[in-house]
Amino acid sequence: MTGIWTRRGRILLGVLGLVLACAPLVSAHLLIDYNTRVQAERDLSELAKVTIGRAELALDDGLRTLTDLSLLGVSKCEERAFDLMRRAVYAHFRVKEVGILGQKGQMICNHMGDAVSFSALSSSYTTRNRNVSLELVDLGESDRVGVMLTWTYGPEGGLATVVPSEVVVPDLLPRMLHAAQGTMTMLDGAVVGRVPAETAPAPPPSGELVAAVERSARYPISMRIAAPLSIFAAQNRNILVYVNVGGALLGILILALLLYVLRGPPSEIAELRRGVERHEFIPYYQPIIEIASGRLVGCEVLMRWRKPDGTVIPPSGFILHAEATGLIKPMTIDLMEQTRRDLEDTFGRHKDLKISFNLFHTHFVSLRTVRDVEALFGHSKISFQQLIFEITERQPLASVQRAQAIIRRIQALGARVALDDAGTGHAGLAYLQQLGVNIVKIDKLFIDSIGQPGSASPIVDSLIRLGHDLGMEVIAEGVETFDQLDYLRNAGADQAQGFLFSQPLPATAFIDLVEAMEPGAKVLAAIPRPARIRPAAKVA
């Protein structure tokens, strides 16, 4: 029996050893295949998201054109309207056509003065702005199509812009995805465009496919990208060679390779999460000046990403990912905590100074935002009356009614609310009346146009008048020249910020600026102003 059990034991040990020897190899293949599929789906999803984002920017350009022309009062086919529409087409390169609509919805004249007819290729969809609708149309040029956005004034007609499909659907496929295909469609299935662009649909890619579909949250479009799994599997071919060849060191080598494959290179999102955990997002403070008196009245808190190597990244390098992942919430709370620590003593002594924070669409979903503000500043030397919260229009609000309730709760604390980038966002100026804000901020886009040929200065005038008519303060952003400041002073703007006064400052520099002020001192007096050169007399 002892000999039998010994022989059986040897067999069992041999089988067990064989299983243990093969298990890492089999597991490695299975895990690599799984990781390849997951990575492929992740890459295609990210590519579809980027494509949708570019499409949204193009459609935003068309919507912004409608907003500008509406504010300028374009409604009739006349020479002034033609001139303004042509300027709009030149200024917004993504827009192909701008025109005025008649009572039946037809384009009675475009920016060239011609009557144009477009055939609808899809259903008509309304957007979050109830006055604006969107549909796919035939441009009548070699099977070209485009997206037409229509702003309806009422029975008397409206305005329309057309963005070509090749602008809405850019070809962003990298070279390694040569066999991939992408299709952007409307919700009813009408094809907006394909990548690579072809006059007819290409044959489907061969082999097992992986695909990703992303849908826009703001427009009725979706993007599907499919590619053969073999393209992604080829990237792991060297790993499989090492796995098969490393017989003697199978366990250790396979384990190391698996850890490398599963870990992969750090993604932007993972890096962003680590930055939040390490409190790498810090506040910078941009001074805000009262135009009439030149006094410092407060600051806007701007976020910067200070990486471990000392590099400082502006918001444009991370804010979109922060919003998309929801990380903007903990980042904003951390920013408020740091601001409270930085400025509590200084603003406790200067009760007339204000601090302005940016909030995003995710902050207006739950009353948790109000509770966070109460917890952070309820027992602080910085009073609620010194706080301003800015609503950014980068993403539309999920519920205007819920946002109204949260804004009223914030105002009930004694804080005030501002609408940031007025006139440039998705909802336009409708938010001014709907949300009941206290302050309207004019975007740098409009300030830059002051004094320029064919400028949008009338838009600045209209925004200032509208804000004052609604009992709001008006703050101009991005002021960089004295000519802009003079124009804003004459137009009646209340406050301004921009590089003319100061770039965003770290905490110590901003505190030094505040403490250096005498009571009632004018910041503008410290800024050297170039002498004006009197123009030479014209020769008769």
Image (cartoon, rainbow, N blue to C red):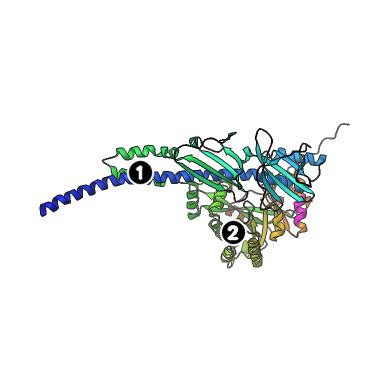
Image quadrant assignment for residue 194: top right
Q: Which residues are magenta?
A: 461-467
Picture coordinates of residue 112, whole percent (x, y): 77, 36
* Residue 255 in view, yes or no: no
Checking the image for residue 29, the label placed there is 1
Location of the C terminus (image quadrant): top right
- Is disc 2 surrounded by few (<14), some (14 to 19) or many (20+) residues within 10 Å? many
- Nearest to the eye among marks 2 and 1: give it: 1
Query: What amino acid is found at the position of numbered circle 1 in the picture?
Result: His
Residue 39, placed above or below residue 196: below
For mark 2, give the secondary structure. Answer: helix
User: What is the CA distance from the residue labelled 2 to the residue labelled 1?
Assistant: 44 Å
The dominant secondary structure in magenta is helix
Name the residue carrying label 2: 363
Q: Is residue 466 a member of the stretch shown in magenta?
A: yes
Q: Tell me what residue is drawn at x 51 percent, y 45 percent.
A: 212
